[in-house]
């Protein structure tokens, strides 16, 4: 492992890529702690102390998670990469229902560049909308529930517009930094930025668990701290094991003559992961459950808002968790259905002379692929639902807040991005006949 790291830095172009990525991440973290103009930093810190962790986490958990806590600090990069992720998901879903986008997707690199440009425009629009929403809540005093301290100095229209434009500009800069890492650095830029923001909160989240237990004695606090570390490492190992799991469906290509040359006759496989949908269902479910909470925030006097406040605000009620769990399972099947098309896969295999041993080409192949995929999605969706419940269990048994580091979306993203990045570095090392990270 250490020799592989040394070999990575001995390779000039790989060393430049790694150092470039680290420089971009340093700039990204700097922008995540610099507040936008007109923000009272002292009052924000006081409000974060006064506001209950549960209510704050349930209201803005997903955006605050992806921004590394910059959202509740009203930093320049407060929105983080969330608008870009939302725009990417929307374009991916629209590709299924809009023929023009589906045609662009099939055109290869040129079509993908056009879809990327649409994603950038949509990211800008979503950034303006989200920045307007959160700046308005900060000015009106509803950003932190239960805190009466003003978090802005001036509430004039011009100052509010400057805050919105600054936060929106921060979103576009984050999007640009992510694309720079993808083009000139190591790994997928957007994923690396998310990984950095989540990993940056790990030490503080762990230490807060220890501090919250100091009242029961130092020995007890250190015991709970060590127990959380052990359980966290076990959860991480289990996530890595399942994320690496896949069902390989063998595919045989028949030999065919093209002119005087023989082609085909090779054997390959279709890799179907247990967690085929990744972390997208968790993001979808969190976004759906965020909508009623947002409604209750702006219309607190209605009966619906009272009911939502009773069951959905803190995020530890059985009704909330049951809805969260069922939504994750639903979106697992939904996302897999729109991203993996057995009909298209079967047609491509038939076009190039491929077949699954023991399965006839055409409709039987479609049915077989759909059957295997549904059988894999069932345990994959249950796995995602159980992993996402870990922060709730921590809230109940450890009295930790919902930003518990070893669970839910955070651990899925950290493990997934780390594995993908290590594999990319390993492939670059293997091209130069070096030992890789995963084989040394």
Image: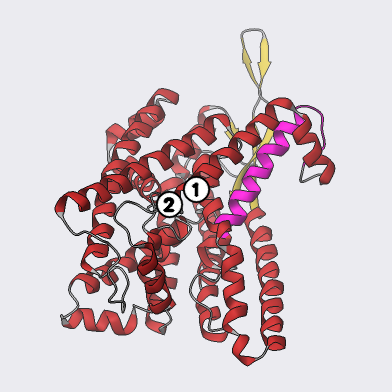
At horizontal 22% and vertical 60% (from top left) the residue drawn is: 136
* x then y, percent, for residue 255: 66, 23
Q: Quadrant of residue 376?
A: bottom right
Near-viewer residue (220 or 58): 220
Q: Which residue is mark 1?
A: 30
Extreme-bottom residue of the structure: 216
Near-viewer residue (52 or 120): 52
Give the vertical position of 378 relative to 354 (above or below).
Answer: below
Tell me the crowding category of disc 1: few under 14, some 14 to 19, or many 20 or more residues within 10 angstroms, Cα based. Answer: few
In magenta, the rendered stretch is: 412-436
Would residue 354 be seen by someone viewing this image from the given angle? yes
At horizontal 40% and vertical 83% (from top left) the residue drawn is: 317
Residue 34 circle label: 2
Magenta segment includes 282: no
* x then y, percent, for residue 437: 77, 44
* x then y, percent, for residue 12: 72, 26
- Quadrant for the C terminus, please: top right
Would residue 331 be seen by someone viewing this image from the given angle? no
Q: Is residue 394 left or right of residue 226?
A: left
Q: Is residue 336 left or right of residue 222?
A: left
The CA span between labels 2 and 1 is 7 Å
Tell me the crowding category of disc 2: few under 14, some 14 to 19, or many 20 or more residues within 10 angstroms, Cα based. Answer: some
């Amino acid at each position: 492992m250490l020799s592989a790291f040394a070999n990575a830095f001995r390779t000039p172009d790989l060393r430049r890529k790694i150092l470039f990525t680290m420089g971009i991440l340093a700039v990204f973290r700097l922008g995540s702690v610099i507040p936008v103009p007109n923000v009272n930093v002292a009052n924000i810190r006081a409000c974060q102390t006064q506001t209950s962790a549960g209510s704050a986490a349930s209201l803005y958990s997903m955006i605050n998670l992806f921004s590394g806590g910059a959202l509740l600090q009203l930093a320049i990069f407060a929105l983080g990469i969330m608008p870009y992720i939302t725009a990417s998901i929307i374009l991916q879903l629209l590709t299924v229902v809009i023929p023009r986008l589906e045609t662009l997707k099939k055109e290869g690199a040129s079509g993908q560049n056009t879809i990327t440009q649409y994603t950038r425009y949509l990211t800008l629009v979503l950034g303006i909308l989200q920045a307007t929403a959160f700046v308005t809540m900060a000015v009106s005093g509803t950003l932190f529930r239960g805190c009466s301290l003003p978090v802005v100095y001036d509430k004039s229209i011009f100052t509010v517009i400057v805050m919105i434009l600054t936060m929106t500009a921060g979103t576009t800069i984050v999007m640009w930094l992510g694309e720079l890492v993808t083009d000139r650095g190591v790994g997928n830029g957007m994923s690396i930025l998310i990984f950095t923001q989540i990993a940056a909160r790990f030490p503080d989240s762990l230490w807060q668990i220890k501090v919250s237990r100091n009242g029961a004695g130092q020995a007890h606090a250190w015991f709970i701290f060590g127990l959380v570390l052990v359980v966290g490492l076990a959860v991480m190992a289990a996530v890595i094991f399942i994320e690496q799991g896949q069902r390989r469906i063998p595919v045989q290509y028949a030999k065919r003559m093209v002119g005087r040359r023989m082609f085909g006759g090779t054997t390959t496989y279709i890799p179907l992961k247990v967690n085929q949908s990744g972390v997208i269902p968790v993001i979808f479910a969190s976004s759906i459950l965020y909508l009623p909470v947002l409604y209750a925030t702006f219309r607190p006097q209605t009966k619906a808002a009272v009911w939502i406040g009773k069951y959905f605000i803190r995020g530890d009620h059985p009704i909330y968790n049951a809805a969260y769990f069922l939504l994750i399972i639903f979106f697992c099947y939904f996302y897999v259905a729109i991203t993996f098309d057995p009909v298209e896969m079967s047609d491509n295999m038939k076009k190039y002379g491929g077949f699954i041993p023991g399965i006839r080409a055409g409709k039987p192949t479609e049915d077989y692929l759909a059957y295997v995929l549904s059988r894999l999605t069932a345990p994959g969706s249950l796995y995602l639902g159980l992993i996402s419940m870990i922060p709730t269990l921590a809230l109940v048994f450890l009295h930790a807040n919902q930003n518990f580091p070893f669970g839910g979306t955070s651990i899925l993203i950290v493990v997934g991005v780390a594995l993908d990045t290590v594999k990319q570095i390993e492939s670059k090392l293997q091209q130069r006949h070096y030992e890789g990270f995963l084989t040394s």
